Image (cartoon, rainbow, N blue to C red):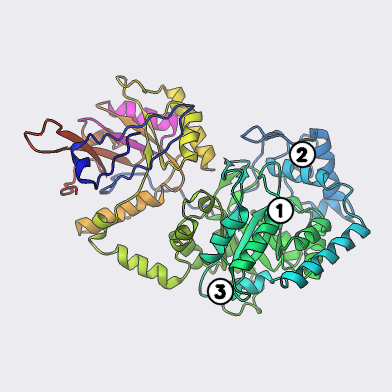
Amino acid sequence: LKRINPMHSTAKKKQIHLKTMVTATTIISPVLLLLFLLASVNGFMSSSTQQKRIMPLASSTATTKDKAGIQSPYTPEQLQTALDSLWSIDSSNADFDARHIYGYGNNKDDHKMSMLQIITATRILDYQGKQSPESLQSLEQDALNFAKDHGPILPLDKVISSQYPKMALAAEFKRASPSKGRMADADMSCGDQTAQYAQAGANVISVLTEPTWFQGSLQDLQDARMRTTSASSEKDRPAILRKEFVVNEYMIAEAAAHGADTVLLIVAVLPQHLLKRLIDYSRKLGMEPLVEVHALEELDVALEANAKVIGVNNRNLHTFQMDLNTTNVVAQKLSDKGLSYAAASDQSDNDTILCSLSGMSTADDVHRYRQIGVGMCLIGESLMRSPDPKLAIASLCLEPADYNDKQQQQSNTAAAYTRGTQIVKVCGITSGNDAITACRAGANWIGTIFVPKSKRCVTKEQATEIVQAVQSFGERQGSSSMELPTTANNKPLAHFQQMASVLEKNSKRPLVVGVFQNQSPEFIKEMVQECGLDLVQLHGKEGMAACAETGVPAIRVVDMEIGGDDDINQKKICGFTLIRNYYRPCGNFT
């Protein structure tokens, strides 16, 4: 890629041509910032009806390997036996206690384990034989000694409620994941990264300790505790969360002995009797566990087990599909049950404390959950990929006043020029592997070219492969749905900024853009529908009607001459505008 700074005086006389090709051996390097002046979309199909309830867990076809090819060291038979033992051991009514667990019951014999269950079963076997009365007692003593030397355990419910009206933040450290692969260099210091989180205002530090798929360790957990303790005052020290696939008391005591203040308990893999036992044991050590749910059936189990702090995972860990509405659905269910959960300065009278886990990366995400009474948001991937975690945390506007100030600033009509919209588009992608490379490097848009004369023109089959890869990376099914304003703003700059904000918000997870040039509306529509494109880019002299029936938003390339009439280096610069089926003048670019 050519590195061109459009603000530099000499850059205006250079060719600024926003085309990039990623090959299997190429890593995307520089960030290309585009200024999008946006109008509105006519006849664009708005988002589908909001999900009214959380659907039952979808069938999984996961093998013992994840997307990166990492495999459990145990056989499928060993893994299934381990799960069976977890579901039924010490239960007086296994069918009732495991009623919410995917694969248990009538279809148990032909059940295919999800990746969540494979990881959990692996951890069961990893810890097999470690727990005994003597070993547990030894760890409990180690936990007491650690607390004596480095400070007492912080109760999670008190940490969260003490932040009100600020949104409490759980900032996560994870080196890799089954769905996204590696996120951090092998030599990245967990202590240094989490110290930045703490200094930026994180109230909870979540540390993945699972070693195979997440490449974590107990050493990471202890490093996070030691560094954040030294980087904070005793009053402001963040609570440390061991994020693991906890299946026994030994793992909880082990967490406390390495400096954790709380542990994650995942309802999706724990039968009710065991969940209750682990919650009680955590409290015996002075910990208030974070109890994770996804489906409404799991919420019922958590409540019956007397969970206090409930975290809603917006990601279905069986299918790795993301739906940010999951937290809203659970919140509504709590209200329907007459249970109090809304964030407040004193939550001692609340039945539960509600947290939202996964999928958030912006101030708008945080504000969305603040409005429904969520007390804490957990954010991981976006912080791990950020070159400046402190700035990323500041941009979340955890304080309501900061968010209001940001909204006021953006309402300034000059903001469209002074701020701009930052979206990275990597174009000319021809394979799913290249698309994943671009996504992992931070691209917002993946461009696929359907223009026959282009050397990077893709077939329908190639485009479909790319779309499927990008959707899988973004943990979504189907094309993206954008909710656009129903009425246009009469002030041009404010209108452009409004539409720019819509496009930027919907580009948090990568989208696939189909590039067309002077092709028929029928062909464009066919490619959109058959390949599953998220956006159309018109790159020729076709009329606006070319994209009117596609059902997805379209962007129009705007070519402008730069340089003087006698300038032999005179070239064109490309800008984009989100369009209707007619041209709306958008003024001059600067």
Q: Is residue 334 visible?
A: no
Q: Which residue is mark 2?
A: 107
Tell me where residue 450 appears, x and y as whole percent. 35, 25
Q: Is residue 432 above or below residue 184?
A: above
589 relative to 85 in the view: left or right: left
Q: Secondary structure at mark 1?
A: helix
| Residue closer to the observer: 186 or 248 | 186
Identified by mark 3, the residue type is Gln
405 relative to 543 in the view: left or right: right
Identified by mark 1, the residue type is Gln
195 relative to 9 in the view: left or right: right
Look at 52% across and 54% down and name the residue there: 383
Badge 1 crowding class, 10 Å Cα cut-off, few under 14, some 14 to 19, many 20 or more, is few
**Disc 2 + disc 3, Cβ < 8 Å:** no
Q: Is residue 164 magenta?
A: no
Look at 61% across and 43% down and name the residue there: 186
Cα distance between the residues tagged 3 and 1: 29 Å
**Sequence-earlier tag: 2 or 3:** 2
Identified by mark 2, the residue type is Asn
Q: Secondary structure at mark 2?
A: loop
**Disc 1 + disc 2, Cβ < 8 Å:** no
The answer to which quarter of the image holds residue 532 is top left
Q: Which segment did they paint magenta?
A: 519-541
